[in-house]
Amino acid sequence: MATATVSTSNRIVPGGSFLIAAAESADCFFPEDFTEEHRQIARTASDFATNEVVPLSDRIEAKEFDVTRRLIRKASELGLTSVDIPEEYGGLEMDKMASAIIADNIAKQGSFSVAFSAHTGIGTLPIVWYGTEDQKKSYLPRLASGAWIAAYALSESTSGSDALSARTRAVLSDDGSSYILNGEKMWISNAGFADLFTIFARCRVPEGKDAGKERLTAFLVERGTPGFTIGKEEHKLGIRGSSTCPLIFADCRIPAQNLLGEVGKGHHIAFNILNVGRYKLGNAAVGAARTTIGHGIRYALERKAFGKSIADFGLIQEKLADCAVGVFVGEALSYRVVGMIDAALATVDRHDPAAIQKAIEDYAVECSIVKVWTSEMLDHVVDDVVQIYGGYGYVEEYPAERAYRDSRVNRIFEGTNEINRLIITGWLMKAALSGRLALMPAIKQLMDEVMEGPVPEEEQDGPLAAEFAILGKARKLTLFAAGVASQRYQQQLAEQQEIMGSIADMAIELFAMESAILRASKMSARTTAEIPIAMARLYTSAAMEKIELAGRRIVAAVAEGDMLRTHSAILRRLAKYELIDTIALRRTVARHLTAAGKYTL
Ligand SMILES: Cc1cc2nc3c(=O)[nH]c(=O)nc-3n(C[C@H](O)[C@H](O)[C@H](O)COP(=O)(O)OP(=O)(O)OC[C@H]3O[C@@H](n4cnc5c(N)ncnc54)[C@H](O)[C@@H]3O)c2cc1C
């Protein structure tokens, strides 16, 4: 069964293009564009998490892994574990939107959400995309039904971010019948109870341009294979009910047919699967934020201080509004990216892993943006909700405490946020240099324009006219800052990490701002959208401040003297916009939330 994203143009929007050209809302997929089938999946996943998972939270947190296993099995009976698996191997084979919706709606219990995502995402997808016919036939039906649980093992104790320097080695036996694995892996989610592991190890490439060199290669290793042991559970800050263990390989012999993909091509598998992991982490982070703000709203309404409900205080309303804006924008940008990927995958032969890989890689920059933005948004939300709970936020009996602890890992795994920021700028610069993204012509055009004098205002109509104008300026500011930085450092830009990070911050905020404005504008074309419009206005104002600040940081670092003065004047001109009353807008949003008693638009 394949679902189609019907409410959008389905036009393929090239990765990274948001930086050089305004997107059309008709090309963007937002939650309002869900099909009836998508909505049904959302209800099924949400009801399952609320009625089956959350009530068992204490047992999950106590690391009763048989409970987690049983729940994954139950989820599979509802079809929730198999949406990414082809029908011929026991799956439902839906679009990526379906699995993103599941990741979002199941994220009501952090530990279970991580176990579920590790199984269905990074654990299962390597076989779906790179498995041989025999591997698919053998493993996918068991993974689809939840009878077997999957894990993905890339990190090692000495190489997490620097994954290519992994030390685990695989050597082909003399008779060519098996590979012998030696080494260790660290931090492997689901390791305590998984049955099947995708392992990445260095292996000598037999032929081709890398012949004789050792390159990362993927293998499938079953639990119980002699020479394969699983170390002790880590005791973690958060997601304590998820399993995280080291793996040890000591002369572990696996059949040669358990090679996954080609020798020496494991990095493609590893990194491409991580792109999916990143945007799905975004959906899960948004789901967790929605759940947490729900607790915050209910608590704020119940708690009395100074003779009133704390929800009546402006400083609490401000937090509630900011959390809700975070969820609104998070939904917008994460589903927009899934829509972009679905549109690209719709044109690709699903039996061709290289084509699938390329289609997803084209959106690597958007996947990293979603990962960084949503994980940082969730950290703000859980922090605000702990604050709303006051002292009760600091004790275990109340949900804010666990949400606060569970959130933190999202900035560490699936590539730390530092690594993802470097990926964002690095990817954009590479795409620009190769000509794949017309970034350099766009920068040149802007430079010519700003040198000629005042930049003409972009005229827009409608309730978000001012925000569209700010968006245009934000894009120019980002291009200007990227332009002066690349002019100054050229090929050495990668060595200036703080500048790379600031360019990434600008690109992230630009994409988030655009997603918020386009979502609200698309909603307002269909119905009255007072709250989405207020949220988009609030976010535009906050994002523009961040973009301007990052631009100033870059300019001050790359220029001095007269050049600095000229650049600063250009920055000021590009960052000129009318102030809006964010206090009144936040109050409007907060009153809407407290009247509803939950996050709603
Ligand atoms: C709960 C949990 C579950 C996990 N699950 C899995 C799993 O299922 N499978 C798996 O393979 N891995 C998993 N991981 C591992 C995770 O992906 C790594 O921890 C992560 O990639 C960071 O690697 P590291 O811990 O070695 O940190 P390091 O790479 O040592 O980084 C330490 C710090 O230095 C920074 N840093 C590193 N390199 C650079 C650089 N070039 N420039 C700037 N800053 C840099 C990092 O951003 C970080 O702040 C899990 C981790 C945790 C905590």
Image (cartoon, rainbow, N blue to C red):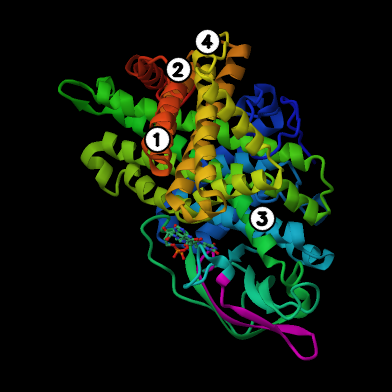
Q: Nearer the viewer, mark 2 or mark 4?
A: 4
Q: CA distance from mark 4 to mark 3?
A: 40 Å
Is residue 284 at all visible to an observer of this figure?
no
Q: Amino acid at mark 3?
A: Asn
Which is closer to the viewer, label 1 or label 3?
Answer: 1
Cα separation, mark 4 vs mark 1, equals: 37 Å
Label 2–label 4 contact, CB within 8 A: no
Mark 2 vs mark 3, CA separation in Å: 37 Å
Crowd tier of the residue under label 4, counting other residues whose Cα lies within 10 Å: few below 14, some 14–19, many 20 or above: some
Q: Which residue is mark 1?
A: 564
Answer yes or no: do the residues labelled 2 and 1 have beta carbons within 8 Å?
A: no
Mark nearer the N terminus (2 vs 1): 2
Q: What is the span of residues highlighted in magenta in the rendered image?
A: 165-191
Q: Tag 1, which secondary structure? A: helix
The residue singled out by tag 3 in the image is 272
Q: CA distance from mark 1 to mark 3?
A: 41 Å
Foreground mark, 2 or 1, reads 1
Question: Residue beneath label 4, please?
Answer: 463
**Residue displayed at 60% across by 44% down:** 428
Name the residue nearer the viewer: 17 or 45. 17
> In x, y percent, where is residue 225?
64, 80
Q: Position of residue 8 (x, y in %)?
A: 72, 26
Disc on res. 534: 2
Cα separation, mark 2 vs mark 1, equals: 36 Å
